[in-house]
Image (spheres, rainbow, N blue to C red):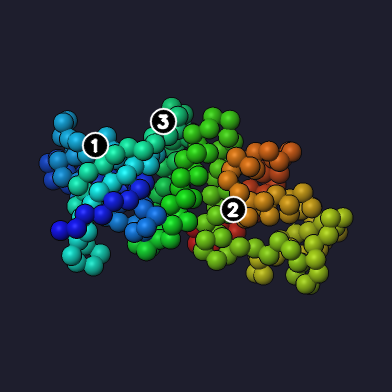
């Protein structure tokens, strides 16, 4: 049987039998796959070191003959472990939450962009100086974008270009801003959203002046957009 090799990130692990585990893994080429890791819970297992959470590994596996069936994990090699995440409880808990959310939302044929998304999340969580709210905010924005729900950040509900000297509220029905004299959002908020939805990694967003103040205003907006799309 042909063996396939790919980078992989673990999304879920389920104990099976006395020493095995069923792994749900995200890969750039094969999407989301489910593999049986035989004997991985034994102390001397050669597979265990390459299937840590918050890690990127190179795996070799054998696909199931049945469509959607369970494949078999043949070997693993740890490429990078983001060990600083598990040293901080808040970062660990957010990491678990975002992994679970991505696993729930993605189909088996997940695009490569989802793998890149998860890797960028690990990079952000592994950086002790990175605000956790920024990681969550960025993650939600990328999920919206990948799901085809990017807001219109260039024209308002009337079709006019967004202006630097006007205030806006957000129109969730049309996924765009509406001009309001005493609106909550200004040009700085719009600019930050544009940078976020452009796919810049979280590290780039930390360089924006006043990022924490911007997040205070924009986090409820991002959460509401996500909830509107059943997240």
Give the CA separation, mark 1 to mark 3: 16 Å
- Secondary structure beneath label 3: loop
Q: Quadrant of residue 209?
A: top right
Left or right of 96, for residue 63: left
**Is residue 141 shown to the viewer in this render?**
yes
Residue at figure coordinates x 43%, y 52% from the top left: 115
Compared to 94, does 200 lie above or below?
Answer: below
CA gap, disc 2 and disc 1: 33 Å
Badge 1 local density, few (<14 within 10 Å), some, or many (20+)?
A: some
Q: Which residue is mark 3?
A: 83
Check the image and report above or below for 14 versus 63: above
What whole-number distance in Å separates the C-alpha atoms at marks 2 and 3? 25 Å
Residue assigned mark 1: 48
Q: Which mark is residue 199?
A: 2
Location of residue 152 in the rendering, given as x and y in whole percent from the top left corner: 68, 65
| Image quadrant containing the N terminus | bottom left
Q: Is residue 1 left or right of residue 27?
A: left
């Amino acid at each position: 049987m042909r063996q396939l090799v790919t980078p992989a990130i673990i999304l879920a692990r389920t104990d099976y039998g006395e020493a095995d585990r069923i792994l749900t893994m995200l890969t750039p080429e094969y999407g989301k796959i489910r593999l049986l890791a035989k004997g991985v819970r034994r102390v001397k297992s050669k597979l265990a070191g390459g299937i840590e959470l918050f890690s990127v590994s190179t795996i070799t596996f054998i696909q199931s003959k049945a469509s959607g069936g369970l494949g078999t994990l043949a070997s693993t090699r740890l490429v990078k472990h983001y060990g600083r995440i598990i040293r901080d409880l808040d970062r660990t808990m957010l990491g678990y939450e975002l992994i679970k959310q991505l696993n729930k939302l993605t189909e088996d044929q997940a695009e490569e962009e989802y793998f890149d998304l998860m890797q960028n999340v690990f990079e952000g969580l592994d950086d002790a100086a990175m605000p956790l709210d920024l990681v969550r905010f960025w993650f939600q924005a990328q999920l919206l974008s990948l799901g085809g729900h990017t807001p219109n950040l260039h024209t308002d509900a009337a079709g006019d270009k967004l202006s630097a000297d006007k205030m806006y509220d957000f129109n969730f029905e049309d996924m765009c801003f509406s001009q309001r004299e005493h609106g909550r959002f200004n040009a700085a908020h719009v600019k930050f959203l544009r940078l976020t939805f452009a796919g810049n990694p979280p590290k780039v967003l930390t360089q924006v002046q006043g990022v924490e103040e911007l997040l205070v205003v924009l986090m409820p907006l991002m959460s509401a957009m996500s909830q509107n799309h059943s997240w």
